[in-house]
Amino acid sequence: MVVDLDSRTTRQLTTNLVYDFEPVWSPDGSRIAYTSEYLTGEIREYVMEGSTRTEEEAGDRDILIMNNDGSDLVRLGTSGTTDEQPSWSPDGNKIAFVSYQGGNSNIWVADSDGSHASQITDLPGENWMPAWSPDGSQIAFTSHSTGTWEINLMDADGGNLRQVTTANELRSDNWGPVWSPDGEKIAFAGMRGDNWEIYTMDQEGGNVQRLTDHSSADYEPIWSPDGTRMAFASLRGGRTAVYLMDADGSGVEALGIHGIPSSWMRTP
């Protein structure tokens, strides 16, 4: 789904019967990569609390790329395994993604046509949500390799790996890094107590600033292209919906659309 922020209108691009999600614009705005599930044709019966229901099974998740109008769909990834959570490099030539090849999830990088795929992390646990730095030199991602959700940084080839958040210090899980357009800050969701809020930090984990403070969960922040605003998901209206705010956490407003924001593109 594409949202025009001026008119607050939406435009649906896919018609899959299962799930299409995690869409991200290519840097030039011409293409969109996203994660998709497809129906396999296999029908299964489920018995729950004495009642029986039938569902068609979903297959592995794949990464698909299409033009920004939904045309010219191509598949990126490997058949027979789950590939998801694509992230474009700033020059549009590569895509970082999560793959379950070999068992648990790790971060991989491939050319934007799917060729030359290579694994760049080899960590235990779940490793998700890669995000390229604006200069293309680093990738941030979320990892559960230590037993808590933490944000890690590494060079774009997988070297110089380091953890930049610490659950013991912040008393929280830390999730979903996204770089500011100038590369100076990383926004993320942190759980304090039993609630998710949105924070920013310097790229090496210092100067943590809390942006939201609400009794309902706020999470999945994304930056506007000029770095002055953010969109985020929140349960503050009783249902997951998209909200906007200034980059310092002020000026919160409901967009009036249910869902989770994934990518923000400036159009001509």
Image (tube, grey):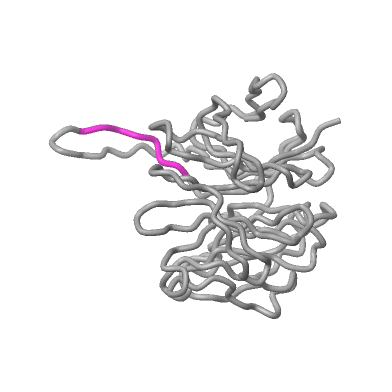
Residue 24 lies within the magenta run: no
Residue 80 seen from this side:
no
Q: In this view, does 211 lie to the left or right of 133?
A: left
Count of all numbered marks drawn on residues in the image: 0
Residue 9 rendering spot, x and y as whole percentages: 65, 20
Q: In which quarter of the image is residue 249?
A: top right
- Position of the C terminus, as image quadrant, is top right
Q: Quadrant of residue 21?
A: top right
Q: Quadrant of residue 208?
A: bottom right
**Who's the residue at 53% across and 62% down the image?**
100
Q: Residue furthest left?
A: 50
Q: Which residue is nearer to you in this view: 212 or 80? A: 212
**Who's the residue at 59% across and 47% down the image?**
221
Residue 57 lies within the magenta run: yes
Residue 7 rendering spot, x and y as whole percentages: 69, 19
- Position of the N terminus, as image quadrant, is top right
Magenta residues? 52-58
Q: In this view, does 59 lie to the left or right of 153?
A: left
Residue 199 rendering spot, x and y as whole percentages: 56, 56
Residue 216 rendering spot, x and y as whole percentages: 40, 42
Q: Is residue 178 left or right of residue 68?
A: left
Residue 255 seen from this side:
yes
**Who's the residue at 73% across and 56% down the image?**
95
